Image (spheres, grey):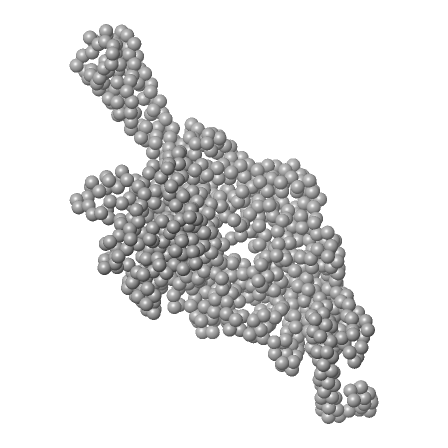
């Protein structure tokens, strides 16, 4: 027998403007630090809580709902077996809690009791530890907070990685009593108001409804589903990912290499916060990738077929789920989803053979969103897009057109390694400080910030597109007052992209009828309703500001030389190329559709005449009834010959009140209902009929008004594509002006990069004059540098970079990479001039790091990144390799570095390759593919016997030729290593250097026949090492 203390739950109380004494007392219980329940646990121990003594919760005896133990391969940690014998001894409300907990054991239940969300047992312990709530009095762990605080407390737990289930009361006590009266046999467990889980929220399923609260960041948070299929030496991946606050589903299927390069890049471009995968279906390599690259990301396994659906079940569920239903033609598949369907199946229930894995991934997302009660809200938007890895478009490399110019794909490829190594989005520590994104992000709107990130991850490779952006930025720089005024208006805009998704959810008819939230009893419903209206009005105001922004630019249309700006700020009536929708009529409609101020005050929309036909019909009926009532009353006054009035209230309205002196004329058709001094009250068949019609009309009015907000939102959302197109135009304009602000605020000289298309006679080139690192301010005394590859004074494609430790080699390489990326974005770059041919892809092998989670050493990581370069690079790529080979012995490292340099020379891709291997310099001194360069320095007090006395001044200037030494002992001195240790190290270095030189001389002397001049030179060299 289980012995468990009972909770006493407060009775359900209707909303009240006054905070009642009972509510105050309960709030005090939740917040009082003097609460006696907390005192036994002040030392942090919770061993005394009764739930910890429950047999079925003990680790050795815990089971899932199907009674499987944790060592069973099919064990479901999301559920818990709770014995029926235990539940028999619970209160009805606690029984509800345990039944929900048994099916959602991985969730923290926010359990509605009256006006409060309450947490019990293990959930209460979490709330106290993570949210600093206080335990309530009693033997059991128990805490809570008022309904209005749900958003704050749920967000805090979700950010920490918890899954939160919101449980609402979906019955009033009166409804419960009526239900019980309709049942034959009523048990004590029937005598409790119904409760239902209305939403489950995780990091990957946040929609920021009026209950949840607002988003704290503009960045997208993606929910991913991944599945795979091995075919020989390659792996095919199917992916589906979505930002649930926006509602676009991206589906893709692709073959990946053994390094999972495409999947890594996908994760870098669209960082997941939660990944769903098929249990026991991922390869070890993929699993390692998830645990290493996404170590802090929530990863949730789903049961094959049951939760991670096959493609047929996915499409069948979508077809039958009322997501895309059309009254005239059944299932109306969204255009974006049609490409994933097999054309041979007219019903659309079979996936295209090239996208079977992608549709399966969509099935996993659908199941999960359904489990979170978000499927109808998001899928009904019908926004599906094909995801293709950037390098799939580059599979054949840039090819030559029939003419002499090469054809490039639309976007440059930046893989996850390059984005990280160049600190474009975030650094190796996942921080954004000091990144290119942070430097360029001067956007005014959240949706602009999201687009800027996309531009950074996928810069253009199409020269026409790049020049179009350059023209726009140049024109904007020439109109600073216009930019300032437009940015001022943009700053006032809310996150329109997310608001469109929220309004769609609030206007969804199917959701309003079937979702448990439609049955939920909210005590703060008026506040939530007001917030919905405020957000709607804010959205309308935002689009009105968009119209003002467009009008600013239309005033300059005659002089506007940028086609891109014309597209973003003009509609088709103003210019044939304009893409901005004409919103004037729609905005006027919603501006006059209802009284905005009154709606904000009362939390309900009362539409103007002609806006809602159903509401108009009800008002017409009420007006008709009023007229008939007045006519009937006038007829009765004439009949009785005196003043007759209506009296009574509610269901006793419309009684005819007749003075006693005139009642003689009241015949049998007048039913006496009551009297007061001097008057009698009558009903007639006519008044009873009018009352019946009046009550029915009022009931209809109440029903219509209850659903009126939703219908207005639905009317707005019917033009979703129009509103969304306007948001996309605004986001492009915002990003362009952000790049303008960067160019204006850079502090030093900036230039417009000039692109030249290579030909058979002209090979790929890069020529930067006085280039500066974009993330370092000129005020910091940064020294600019020239970089020339494949043109001018340096016709070779590989530059071998040497120089002292800490001399700026890595900084130079990152600088070149970042300037190239900025150039392809269409951005001005910090340099006096920049000329280059398009770069199809940037590769990097920078820094030294291992990957413990993936079991990869520093040297293995280096070689993996290098292998990716050699496998994917074309002659139009930019390759940046920093000190390859440092993770192994000098001889092995030198040999590998030499082989890689030679191969890069053969590929003819633009390359900066830094090294401290001076034998490598000698090997390629006379190579036709390699030029030598170094970071200059100045050495004072140079001492061949004691390097600790030397002073090396870094000039941070890139110069031609090789640096004779790396000056490692100077770095040791700067790091604080003692002079004695430096001297010992230096003597050993001299000894090793001489031994190496003797070995070379021996090989040179006896490896081939020598002539007299060679012998003389050798003798001279021998004398120097003796």
Question: Is residue 98 depicted above or below 944 in this figure?
Answer: above
> Residue 823: which quarter of the image?
bottom right
Residue 626 % position (x, y): 33, 20
Task: Please tell me which residue is depicted at 79% across the width and 79% down the height of the picture.
Answer: 944
Can residue 581 be seen?
yes
Along the line of sight, the residue nearer the viewer: 456 or 202: 202
Quadrant including the C terminus? bottom right
Quadrant including the N terminus? bottom left
Question: Is residue 561 depicted above or below 298 in this figure?
Answer: above
Residue 503 % position (x, y): 45, 42
Q: On the picture, is 596 further left or further right than 872?
A: left
Along the line of sight, the residue nearer the viewer: 912 or 858: 858
Question: Is residue 250 depicted above or below 590 in this figure?
Answer: below
Residue 759 % position (x, y): 68, 64
Task: Please tell me which residue is depicted at 34% across the width and 30% down the height of the picture.
Answer: 701
Task: Please tell me which residue is depicted at 46% across the width and 50% down the height of the picture.
Answer: 155
Q: How many marks?
A: 0
Q: On the picture, is 514 further left or further right than 250?
A: left
Question: Is residue 970 depicted above or below 779 in this figure?
Answer: below
Along the line of sight, the residue nearer the viewer: 650 or 515: 650
Residue 252 % position (x, y): 47, 60
Can residue 104 be seen?
no
Q: On the picture, is 888 further left or further right than 83?
A: right
Q: On the picture, is 877 further left or further right than 495?
A: right
Task: Please tell me which residue is depicted at 28% across the width and 59% down the height of the picture.
Answer: 82
Along the line of sight, the residue nearer the viewer: 10 or 516: 10
């Amino acid at each position: 027998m289980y012995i468990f203390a009972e909770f006493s739950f407060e009775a359900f109380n209707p909303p009240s403007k006054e905070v009642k004494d009972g509510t105050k007392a309960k709030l005090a219980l939740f917040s009082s630090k003097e609460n006696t329940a907390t005192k036994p646990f002040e030392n942090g121990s919770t061993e005394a809580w009764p739930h910890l003594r429950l047999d079925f919760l003990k680790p050795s005896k815990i089971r899932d709902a199907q009674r499987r133990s944790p060592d069973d391969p099919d064990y479901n940690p999301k559920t818990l077996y709770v014995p029926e014998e235990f539940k028999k001894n619970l209160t009805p409300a606690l029984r509800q809690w345990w039944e929900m907990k048994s099916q959602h054991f991985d969730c923290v239940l926010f359990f509605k009791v009256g006006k409060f969300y309450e947490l019990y047992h293990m959930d209460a312990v979490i709330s106290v530890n993570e949210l600093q709530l206080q335990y309530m009095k009693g033997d059991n762990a128990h805490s809570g907070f008022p309904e209005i605080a749900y958003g704050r407390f749920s967000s805090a737990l979700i950010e920490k990685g918890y899954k939160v289930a919101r449980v609402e009361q979906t019955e009033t006590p009166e409804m419960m009593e009526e239900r019980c009266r309709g049942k034959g046999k009523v048990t004590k467990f029937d005598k409790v108001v119904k409760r239902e889980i209305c939403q489950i929220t995780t990091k990957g399923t946040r929609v920021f409804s009026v209950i949840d609260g607002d988003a704290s960041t503009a960045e997208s948070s993606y929910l991913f589903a991944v599945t795979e299929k091995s075919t020989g030496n390659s792996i095919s991946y199917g992916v589906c990912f979505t930002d649930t606050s926006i509602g676009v589903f991206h589906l893709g299927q692709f073959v990946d290499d053994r390094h999972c390069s495409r999947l890594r890049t996908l994760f870098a471009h669209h960082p997941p916060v939660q990944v769903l995968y098929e249990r026991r279906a991922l390869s070890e390599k993929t699993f390692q990738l998830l645990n290493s690259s996404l170590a802090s990301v929530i990863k949730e396994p789903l049961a094959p077929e049951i939760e991670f659906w096959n493609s047929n079940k996915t499409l069948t569920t979508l077809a039958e789920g009322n997501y895309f239903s059309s009254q005239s033609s059944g299932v109306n598949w969204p255009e974006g989803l049609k490409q994933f369907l097999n054309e041979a199946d007219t019903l659309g229930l079979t996936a295209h053979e090239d996208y079977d894995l992608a549709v399966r991934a969509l099935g996993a997302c659908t199941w999960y969103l359904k489990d979170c009660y978000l499927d109808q809200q998001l899928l009904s938007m019908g926004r599906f897009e094909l995801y293709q890895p950037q390098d799939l478009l580059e599979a054949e490399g840039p090819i030559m057109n029939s003419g002499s110019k090469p054809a490039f794909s639309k976007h440059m490829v930046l893989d996850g390694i390059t984005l990280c190594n160049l600190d474009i989005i975030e650094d190796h520590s996942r921080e954004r400080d000091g990144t290119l994104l942070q430097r360029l992000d001067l956007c005014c709107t959240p949706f602009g910030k999201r687009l800027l990130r996309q531009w950074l991850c996928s810069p253009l490779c199409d020269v026409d597109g790049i020049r179009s952006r350059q023209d726009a930025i140049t024109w904007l720089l020439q109109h600073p007052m216009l930019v300032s005024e437009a940015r001022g208006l943009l700053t006032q805009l809310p996150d329109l992209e997310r608001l469109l998704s929220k309004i769609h959810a609030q206007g969804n008819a199917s959701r309003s009828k079937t979702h448990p939230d439609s049955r939920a009893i909210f005590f703060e419903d008026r506040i939530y309703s007001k917030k919905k209206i405020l957000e709607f009005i804010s959205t309308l105001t935002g689009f009105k500001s968009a119209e003002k922004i467009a009008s600013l630019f239309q005033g300059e249309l005659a002089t506007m030389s940028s086609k891109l700006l014309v597209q973003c700020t003009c509609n088709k009536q103003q210019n044939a190329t304009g893409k901005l929708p004409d919103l004037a009529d729609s905005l006027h409609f919603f501006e006059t559709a209802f009284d905005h101020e009154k709606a904000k005050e009362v939390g309900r929309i009362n539409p103007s005449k002609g806006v809602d036909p159903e509401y108009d019909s009800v008002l017409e009926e009420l007006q008709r009834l009023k007229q008939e009532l007045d006519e009937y009353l006038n007829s009765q006054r004439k009949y009785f010959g005196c003043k007759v009035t209506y009296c009574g209230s509610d269901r006793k309205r419309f009684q005819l009140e007749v003075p006693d002196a005139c009642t003689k004329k009241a015949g049998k058709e007048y039913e006496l209902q009551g009297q007061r001094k001097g008057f009698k009250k009558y009903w007639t068949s006519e008044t009873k009929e009018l009352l019946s019609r009046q009550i029915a009309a009022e009931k209809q009015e109440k029903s219509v008004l209850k659903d009126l907000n939703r219908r207005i939102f639905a009317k707005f959302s019917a033009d979703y594509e129009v509103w969304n197109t306007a948001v996309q135009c605004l986001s492009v304009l915002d990003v362009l002006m952000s790049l303008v602000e960067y160019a204006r605020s850079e502090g030093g000289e900036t230039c417009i990069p000039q692109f030249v298309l290579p030909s058979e006679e002209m090979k790929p080139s890069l020529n930067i004059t006085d280039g500066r690192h974009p993330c370092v301010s000129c005020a910091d005394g940064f020294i600019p540098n020239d970089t020339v590859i494949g043109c001018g004074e340096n016709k070779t494609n590989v530059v071998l970079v040497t120089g002292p430790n800490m001399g700026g080699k890595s900084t130079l390489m990152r600088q070149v990479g970042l300037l190239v990326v900025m150039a392809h974005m269409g951005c001005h770059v910090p340099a006096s001039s920049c000329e280059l041919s398009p770069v199809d892809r940037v590769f990097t092998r920078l820094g030294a790091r291992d990957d413990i989670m993936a079991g990869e050493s520093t040297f293995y990581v280096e070689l993996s990144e290098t292998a990716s370069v050699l496998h994917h690079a074309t002659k139009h790529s930019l390759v940046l390799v920093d000190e390859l080979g440092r993770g192994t012995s000098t001889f092995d490292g030198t040999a590998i570095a030499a082989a890689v340099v030679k191969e890069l020379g053969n590929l003819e891709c633009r390359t900066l390759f830094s090294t401290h291997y001076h034998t490598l310099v000698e090997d390629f001194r006379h190579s036709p593919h390699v030029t030598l360069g170094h970071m200059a320095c100045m050495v004072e007090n140079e001492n061949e016997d004691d390097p600790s006395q030397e002073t090396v001044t870094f000039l941070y200037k890139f110069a031609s030729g090789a640096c004779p030494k790396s000056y490692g002992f100077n770095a040791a001195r700067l790091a604080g290593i003692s002079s004695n240790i430096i001297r010992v190290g230096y003597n050993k270095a001299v000894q090793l250097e001489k031994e190496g030189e003797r070995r070379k001389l021996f090989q040179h002397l006896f490896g081939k026949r020598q002539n007299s001049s060679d012998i003389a030179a050798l003798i001279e060299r021998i004398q120097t090492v003796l």
